[in-house]
Image (tube, grey):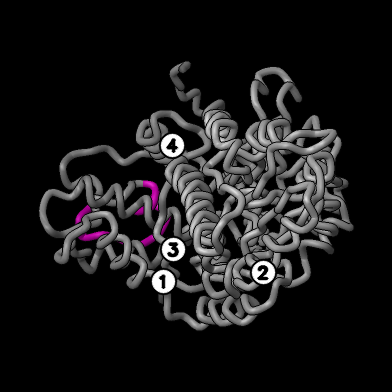
């Protein structure tokens, strides 16, 4: 489905509006809306964002200058083309100082008009792409490959590709670290929205007080430190896909607003009074049992049914251990960025295959990352793996853990040391450490207290 760019024409001369609309609607990529005065234009802008606005300066009631200022304050990505008479070129130049992209003098030629609009659309797209790039760079980058040949994971891939062809809301269920984001990305790239934004919101990592603003944006002065208007991620994702990761952690205060958005596509920025509308596909994921969350009163039943139109369950790694060798090969290449990565010897492979991986694929990746750093040649051995992992497998090693005189620790001591190592590796960031260990931040906090682990105060 080709991208349609939303164009708004604002001019108090009906004949000019008619001709401009005729010229632009001949091109399939433009969806054109018109307004005959500034007040009507602002009302339309309240209801939905536009990519490009063709704007007359001199209009009764609300002038083009006021509309331009409104657009610059509320829709920074929208490109404004000023429509002006030859005698008013000086005014047009002044509007460019206020943030207009360009101007077209009346009478205009068709070629000039279409070329100017095309350049404005291109700049709009570049602006959006730049925002998405900054958004992606702010997240921890990860490859989107789904690795595995087991029947369990291939069933997930087939289901994802099949339902991608619709716009149905999809809920992805699975333990932490199984690759829910990868499946969401597969659905997006297999859909008709693949050329549009794929925006991820980690609902568990954003405080309740900020989540609504992050999702729906806020108006200037809506709360302390809201020094300027901010577009929400639902606007950034317009025409694309919005992935709500760990949706089970959304508070009961935000859930009704999310439900309203899912049902109508409408939302209000924090501190705003006008309903706006975008066209996004919603994917969600959680490691929680939402039915139990509903029973406990922590999740709305109507929101559950709205999210649960189609459900994909991702199996834990212990249910598809035949994929471990392929995953190891993938992570070694990813971490070492070489055609000849390190090898895993037979004994170390036995430990890796017998371990139950409570942190799933994410834990496997971090174990391999650590083993690459600890190994001294081109081979990874059992002694290069975390002691806790080796102990829990129950597999006996010919390379005893005490081969170099080290004492054997209790399970609790091994766990404490593994947690301390993981905390230091992540610069004592508890969120990242809990993800690495495959446990919740609350569980990590309790274990830090239990083992009296000293965490530096930042």
- Residue indicated by mark 1: 147
Callout 4: SS: helix
> Left or right: 196 with respect to 250?
left
Decide: marks 3, 2 in contact (CB < 8 A)?
A: no
Mark 1 and 2 residues: CB-CB less than 8 Å, in contact?
A: no
- Whole-angstrom CA distance, mark 4 to mark 1, is 28 Å
Give the label, 1 or 2, closer to the camera. Answer: 2
Q: Nearer the viewer, residue 255 or 77?
A: 77
On screen, residue 407 versus residue 190, left or right, reads left
Q: Locate residue 75: give its quadrant.
A: top right
Mark toward the start of the polypeptide (4 vs 2): 2
Using the image, determine if residue 449 lies above or below residue 339.
Answer: above
Q: Choose mark 4 or mark 2, whichever is in front.
A: 2
Query: Do labels 3 and 4 touch, CB within 8 Å?
Result: no
Element marked by disc 1:
loop
Of 311 and 319, nearer the camera is: 311
The residue drawn where x is 31% and y is 66% is: 330
Residue bearing the label numbered 4:
419
Above or below for 349 versus 46: below
SS under mark 3: loop
The residue wearing badge 2 is: 25
Q: Which mark, by number, is residue 144? A: 3
Find residue 208 and report its horizontal and vertical position in percent.
Answer: 72, 34
Marks 3 and 2 sit apart, C-alpha to C-alpha, by 38 Å
Q: In what quadrant of the picture does the N terminus appear?
A: bottom right
């Amino acid at each position: 489905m080709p991208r349609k760019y939303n164009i708004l024409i604002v001019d108090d001369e009906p004949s000019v509006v008619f001709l401009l609309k005729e010229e632009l609607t001949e091109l399939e990529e433009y969806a054109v809306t018109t307004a005959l005065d500034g007040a009507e234009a602002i009302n339309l802008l309240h209801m939905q964002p536009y990519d490009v606005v063709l704007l007359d300066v001199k209009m009764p009631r609300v002038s083009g200058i006021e509309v331009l200022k409104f657009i610059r304050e509320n829709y920074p990505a929208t490109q404004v083309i000023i429509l002006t008479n030859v005698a008013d070129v000086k005014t047009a130049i002044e509007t460019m100082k206020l943030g207009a992209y360009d101007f077209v003098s009346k009478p205009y030629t068709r070629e000039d008009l279409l070329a100017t609009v095309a350049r404005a659309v291109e700049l709009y797209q570049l602006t959006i792409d730049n925002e998405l790039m900054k958004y992606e760079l702010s997240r921890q980058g990860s490859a989107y490959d789904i690795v595995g040949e087991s029947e369990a994971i291939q069933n997930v891939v087939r289901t994802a590709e099949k339902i991608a062809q619709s716009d149905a809301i999809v809920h992805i269920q699975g333990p932490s670290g199984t690759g829910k984001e990868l499946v969401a990305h597969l659905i997006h790239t297999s859909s008709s929205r693949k050329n549009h934004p794929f925006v991820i919101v980690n609902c568990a990592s954003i405080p309740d007080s900020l989540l609504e603003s992050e999702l729906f944006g806020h108006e200037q002065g809506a709360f302390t430190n809201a020094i300027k208007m901010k577009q929400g991620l639902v606007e950034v994702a317009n025409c694309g896909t919005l992935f709500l990761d760990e949706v089970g952690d959304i508070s009961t205060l935000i859930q009704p607003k999310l439900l309203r958005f899912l049902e109508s596509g409408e939302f209000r920025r924090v501190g705003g009074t006008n309903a706006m509308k975008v066209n996004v596909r919603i994917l969600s994921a959680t490691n929680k049992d939402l039915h139990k969350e509903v029973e406990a009163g922590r999740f709305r039943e109507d929101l559950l049914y709205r999210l649960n139109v189609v459900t994909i369950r991702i199996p834990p790694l212990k249910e598809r251990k035949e994929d471990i060798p392929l995953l190891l090969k993938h992570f070694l290449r990813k971490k070492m960025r070489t055609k000849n990565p390190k090898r895993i010897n037979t004994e170390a492979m036995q430990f890796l295959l017998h371990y139950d991986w409570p942190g799933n694929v994410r834990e496997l990746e971090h174990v391999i990352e650590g083993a690459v750093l600890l190994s001294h040649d081109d081979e990874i051995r059992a002694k290069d793996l975390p002691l806790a992992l080796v102990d829990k497998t129950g597999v006996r090693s010919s390379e005893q853990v005490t081969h170099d005189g080290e004492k054997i620790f209790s399970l609790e001591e091994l766990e404490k040391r593994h947690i301390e190592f993981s905390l230091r590796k992540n610069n004592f960031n508890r969120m990242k450490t809990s993800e690495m260990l495959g446990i919740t931040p609350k569980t990590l906090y309790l274990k830090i207290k239990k083992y009296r682990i000293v965490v530096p105060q930042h």
